[in-house]
Amino acid sequence: MLGIWTTDRIRAAEEKLLAVMPEGALMHRAAFGVAVHAAEMLAEHTGRVAGTRVTLLVGAGNNGGDALWAGAFLRKRGVSVTAVLLNPDRAHEAGLAALRRARGRLLRAEAGGPAIEQADLVIDGIVGLSARGPLRPDAAKLVERVTAPVLAVDLPSGVDPDTGVVDGPAVRATRTVTFGARKPVHVLNPGFCGQTQLVDIGLADQLGEPDLVQLGIADVAAAWPVPGPEDNKYTQGVTGVAAGSATYPGAAVLATGSAVLATSGMVRYAGSAADVVRADWPEVVGTGSVTDAGRVQAWVAGPGMGTGNEGRSTLRQVLEQGVPVCADADAITLIAKFPDVLDAREPGAPLVLTPHAGEFERLTGEAPGADRPAAARAAARRFDAVVLLKGHSTVVAAPDGRTLVNVATGSWLATAGSGDVLSGLIGALLAAGLDPWLAAGAAAHVHGLAAHLAADGVPVPASKIQAAIPAAIRAIRAATPR
């Protein structure tokens, strides 16, 4: 798992490291990393490094110092470097001196426009981890003139480092180079960070346990159930699906089918869309009600189920069985409208709630707000459930505080029915016995990869995302050495 730490934790770790290192050594490591990535981007963009033009946007503080020192390193490779100083009186003194010695050019902000427009690469060193809020007007005007690729130092200026929120003018980076550890912004707003690259500056021993984690391919591959020689359809987990209605039979088909494709176990469907489900998935055992479905190891409840009395009764029947439940879509609305429905839940029985932002607000009475991980953690504690808060960066929080973020590789999941596909994946992993927090995170990872593979650069419906689940699982397993 990849660790992610808040800015307060990062600063505390840096202070410990600074206390035992020679003055300036940490900045030199960071700046050299920026210079290496800048040279790589120049080669990709122009086909060369020497003879290219780089413009530094330099604010006060250490991020501006990193940019200035990086500029000095780039000068040694024959790059023409111009530093545009937004606050000359507060610019990093040692960094300024280094760039002067390297014969870089220094300009005040009001004279920097042409250098920005003519640059082959712009390095954003305007603000650092301590800054909050959008770019100030003078900086925003300069950023508007950028046409070249942008390399951000630690984070794109104007983007909140702990929440990823953008509430005004901000830099949109092509690549971000961060130091020591990833920060929340890098996973909560990857659209503004671009490709995030980590430079090791020796912080690892000072960090402690991460505040957030991101599952890697190896984590998902290790978690995904694979049948062994002694397994059969029952030992791999039987998934129950209570979904769909006469109005929304497709939700039943999508949720049930994704559960079928997720593992090699068994799926039982309970609901009024049984005939439609069997027509698409003949291997599914279909019945008309939860009470007739037979024994299962986990339930998926909610997609297209309806929010009337019948849906409410079905949800209670599912919760009464004492097995893990993934409650999605209409099930979340029912819990919000009738909180007493959770009284049917067996004490300690695992529950996974999968709201999007609107459902989250109905469920908790408040929108997720800027700090989505904190909101998901609070809801997880309140409901004693794993909460998967959907979004471009999906947040999964457990009642004990464990929190992971899954970053989608595109926006292809923003289509009707994709949530039904996700709920089926989660239900199958719950039935296979995975920890609910890991089940939700692994399912979100495969869901996003399936969307990426299915889309191949063009919009696709949820049924195509569902069909790409085996390819996504295959790709994850193939990428992990055995």
Image (tube, rainbow, N blue to C red):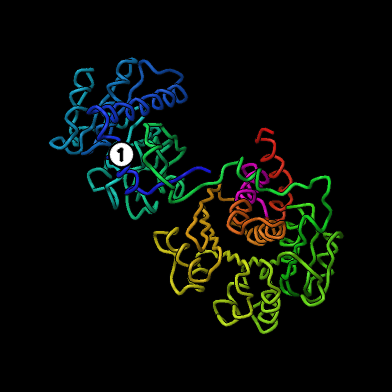
| Front-most of residues 269 and 345 | 345
Q: Is residue 171 left or right of residue 136?
A: right
Find residue 214 and report its horizontal and vertical position in percent.
52, 47
Q: Which residue is mark 1?
A: 14
Q: Main secondary structure of the magenta part?
A: helix
Question: Where 382 sits versus 5, above or below?
Answer: below
- Amino acid of disc 1: Glu
Find residue 193 and report its horizontal and vertical position in percent.
42, 42
Question: Where 108 sits versus 456, above or below?
Answer: above
Magenta-drawn segment: 445-461
| Front-most of residues 95 and 49 | 95
Q: Is residue 424 left or right of residue 160?
A: right
Image point 41% across, 48% down: which residue?
184
Image point 83% across, 62% down: which residue?
284
Question: Where 96 sits versus 266, above or below?
Answer: above
Say which quarter of the image contains residue 373: bottom left
Question: Where 257 sits versus 179, above or below?
Answer: below
Say which quarter of the image contains residue 103: top left
Find residue 301 and report its horizontal and vertical position in percent.
68, 70
